[in-house]
Image (spheres, grey):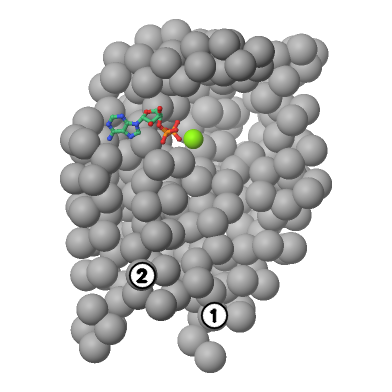
Amino acid sequence: MPSGRFITFEGGEGSGKTTQARLLGDALRARGLEPLLTREPGGSPFAEQVRNLVLDPATAQHSALSEALLFYAARADHVEKVIRPALVSGRWVISDRFSDSTRVYQVEVGGLPLDVFKALELIVVKLTYPDMTLILDVPAEVGLTRATTRRLARAIAGEDADAYEKRDLEFHERLRQGFLAIAEAEPRRCKVIDGTQPPEKVAAEVWAYVEHRMLPPETR
Ligand SMILES: Nc1ncnc2c1ncn2[C@@H]1O[C@H](COP(=O)(O)OP(=O)(O)O)[C@@H](O)[C@H]1O
Ligand SMILES: [Mg+2]
């Protein structure tokens, strides 16, 4: 059985990752595949527990290293228990965020040394590196406005904003530049897509790229 493909969506808050991961899942299902949709932080029971800890605004202050180690503990479990078994059984896996997010948040913004990140990535991700990463790019104001709208909806529902969403415009712009730098460094894996277009246009661009790069001609 052929091994499945591993696709990740990356980008700042409000860039459309969750929306597009779902739409790509729909498009693959329409082609008769049964993709596994997952997310980070989280994606397995243990990793979801770590997610709750890290994203809880009440969690005590801690260093970028502590945070990266927590994320990698979660990722190790997610890869071992969820992603790897699915790929081995031939399923495609779509993850809403993966290791590039740790690189951007903890290295580019948080100041974690790049070699520490690379060591963790090598230990944990190893052969389960994404085949393709779609980076949704939106100006900081756009992402922030979308995330704020979502936050307001949560506030009305009585839920608190998570720790990452509480940051500001300058922070969003640094995230954006961090993701673009990864795309520039790894053009074979990463594709930057203009996330300011309407969702269905973004989805069409994602699909055209996935189809071109990953589906054999006879199944298109
Ligand atoms: N292309 C788009 N244009 C306009 N609004 C969008 C678009 N994609 C998503 N949204 C909306 O913006 C908000 C954030 O989208 P979401 O997919 O949750 O982003 P992310 O997962 O990257 O934070 C949601 O309210 C969503 O409906
Ligand atoms: Mg999301």
Is 67 left or right of 186, judged from the image as shown?
right
Report the amino acid beneath label 1.
Gly
> Tag 2: Cα neighbours inside 10 Å, few (<14), some, or many (≥20)?
few
Q: Is residue 202 left or right of residue 127?
A: left
Residue at left 21%, top 36%? 198
Give the residue displayed 68% in from the left and 39% down from the top: 71
The residue that mark 2 highlights is: 30
Q: Quadrant of residue 88?
A: bottom right
* Residue depth check, mark 1 versus mark 2: number of the one nearer the observer: 2
Residue shown at the point (53%, 91%) measured from the top left: 1
Q: Would you place residue 220 above or below residue 95 in this image?
A: below
User: Which residue type does callout 2 highlight?
Assistant: Ala
* Image: 188 above or below 117: below
Check disc 1: other Cα within 10 Å, few if <14, some if 14-19, many if 20+: some
> Residue 114, how many percent across, how many down?
53, 37
User: Residue 188: x percent and y percent?
Assistant: 29, 60
- Residue hosting label 1: 90
Instruction: Say if residue 186 shows up in the picture.
Output: no
- Residue 85 screen position, x and y as percent: 67, 72
* 139 relative to 107, above or below: above
- In primary-sequence order, the first of circles 1 and 2 is 2
Q: Secondary structure at mark 2?
A: helix
Q: Nearer the viewer, residue 44 or 123?
A: 44
> In screen coordinates, is 45 left or right of 99?
right
Q: Left of 51 or right of it: where is 37?
A: left
